[in-house]
Amino acid sequence: MTTVGILGGGQLARMMALAGAPLGLRFRVLDNVADACAGQFAPMIVGDYTDQAALAAFAAQVDVATFDFENVPAESAQWLSERVPVFPNPRALAVAQDRLAEKTLFRELGIPVPDFADIPSRQALDEAVARLGTPCILKTRRLGYDGKGQFRIKSPADIDGAWAALGAQAGSVGLILEGFVHFDRELSVVAVRGRDGEFRAWPLTENWHVDGVLSASLAPARVDPALQATALAHARTLAEALDYVGVFALELFCKDGELLANELAPRVHNSGHWTIEGSETSQFQNHLRAVLGLPLGDTRMVGLACMLNWIGVMPEASAVLREAGGHWHDYGKEPREGRKVGHATLRADAPMELADALRRVGAVLKREAQVLPVIDALR
Ligand code: AMP
């Protein structure tokens, strides 16, 4: 009997546990909140990620450990890795936790990135805004996610406001300034690398964000084969450089046919949720296969798929359940503003069929604004 330990007990851990059931796996989840939603499916240890007693109890109960949450302190991941195999490895996690280290590595590997600068001080910010020009975005290097810890500088007059909002964090989590990319579309590669180095990727996904949070994903993305090949090559280069094991997502901006890397998510990813129904093997199952050293599953798509995120409140399920290709995911979380509480995936064999399903669901749920960009993309 194999027990997989997951650090973090959110919806990603929950979907991992669900995907692991057919493989006969057991799970233990470590989270600092007692009602973490993966706890509905896997025994939990409640404790802080820096609490050595909790980490020791966790290590004693698992055969291998992985993450649902990327901001587990690197020292905790390292401590754990001295006791039980941990995938992805702590170095990959540490790089992905720091936007500056991540972008520096991308650049070293020849993966194009938006212009960026380390911002240790107010003077550095003034100089970097002058060099990068406006608009630009000041971000925390660590602990930011879903657009949090970011300030958009539209003109030099915004520098004071940006520094007032984030300057205090320059000495702690650190700050990075990025040139603003007027992208045509946002894409992600969700890929997996096995313990033996085998690499597979799902077709590129196109993503739409609202207020920095993923709203909808469409797979396959509308891109030409050369762009798809470049994106996959970047993902593979990165995974090999980090000796990465497991699933990860590389988020990309596409501008005038060129790709710029935004960030590496060292875990299963929201833009890969469609793989549960839209692909031969889901990202969750392939992540488990990778960390356990099992053969990886085929990543080919089954038709087309669109994922719609439910943020803050779960809509009524019937409109999606009524659809032939409609799939409902309620994470069992307390609704709260800004919280990811569930998603739906609509699957179809042809673009027009998917567009029609999206139109119906959007109209019933009054979510026209959410489905419209996807319908446009399917034209
Ligand atoms: P992040 O937390 O870095 O993934 O940012 C969240 C979202 O903010 C991204 O998905 C983009 O929509 C937007 N964003 C972040 N960085 C940039 C950038 N340099 N240029 C334009 N948009 C950005």
Image (spheres, grey):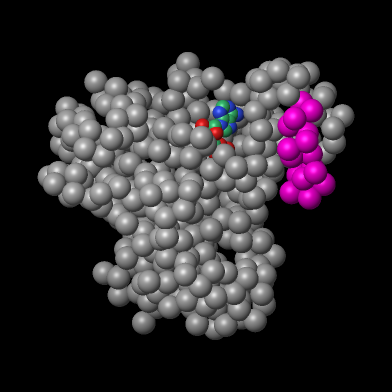
318 sits left or right of 373 in the view: left
In this rendered view, identify the residue nearer to me: 76 or 336: 336
Q: Which residues are magenta?
A: 159-174
Q: Relative to residue 243, is residue 60 depicted above or below? A: below
Tell which quarter ligand 1 is in: top right
Q: Position of residue 268 (x, y in %)?
A: 44, 53
Q: Position of residue 244 (x, y in %)?
A: 53, 54
Whether residue 170 is in magenta: the answer is yes
Q: Main secondary structure of the magenta part?
A: helix
Q: Quadrant of the C terminus?
A: top left
377 sits left or right of 29 in the view: left
Q: Residue 260 falls in which quadrant of the image? A: top right
Q: Residue 70 falls in which quadrant of the image? A: bottom right
Q: Position of residue 211 (x, y in %)?
A: 51, 35
Q: Position of residue 219 (x, y in %)?
A: 31, 36
Residue at screen point 73% across, 32% down: 162
Q: Evaluate whether residue 292 shows in this view.
A: no
